[in-house]
Image (spheres, rainbow, N blue to C red):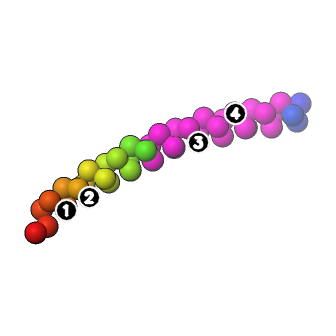
Amino acid sequence: RNMLVHGYAEIRYDIIYEVLQHELDKLEELLNILWREAETLDP
């Protein structure tokens, strides 16, 4: 039973990690776009 709980927790952790990774990727993309725009605005 303990192993089952541990396995379930690991699966949930994997899902959370994947979601976070996806969000971080989107955030990084957004930051890159903002960075490029800031560079073009700055003479």
Q: Which residue is mark 1?
A: 39
**For this view, does 5 lie left or right of residue 13?**
right
Q: Residues within 10 Å of mark 3 (few under 14, many from 20)?
A: few
- Lower sequence index among marks 3 and 1: 3
Residue at coordinates 88% horizontally, 36% vertically from top-left? Answer: 2
- Lower sequence index among marks 2 and 4: 4
- Lower sequence index among marks 3 and 2: 3
CA gap between label 2 and label 4 equals 36 Å
Q: Amino acid at mark 1?
A: Glu
CA gap between label 4 and label 1 equals 42 Å
Q: Amino acid at mark 2?
A: Trp
Can you give x and y, in whole percent of width and height, for residue 4 in the image?
Answer: 83, 30
Nearer to us of marks 3 and 2 is 2
Q: Nearer the viewer, residue 39 or 10?
A: 39
Q: Which residue is mark 2?
A: 35
Could you tell me if the residues under marks 1 and 2 are in contact, i.e. CB atoms within 8 Å?
A: yes
Residue at coordinates 43% horizontally, 44% vertically from top-left? Answer: 25
User: Disc number at residue 17?
Assistant: 3
Which image quadrant: the N terminus?
top right
16 in magenta = yes
**For this view, does 7 lie left or right of residue 26?**
right
Q: Which residue is mark 4?
A: 11
Q: Residues within 10 Å of mark 1 (few under 14, many from 20)?
A: few
Which image quadrant: the C terminus?
bottom left
Magenta-tinted stretch: 4-24
40 in magenta = no
- Lower sequence index among marks 3 and 4: 4
Q: Residues within 10 Å of mark 2 (few under 14, many from 20)?
A: few
Could you tell me if the residues under marks 3 and 4 are in contact, i.e. CB atoms within 8 Å?
A: no
- Dominant secondary structure, magenta: helix
Q: Nearer the viewer, residue 30 or 16?
A: 30
CA gap between label 1 and label 2 equals 6 Å
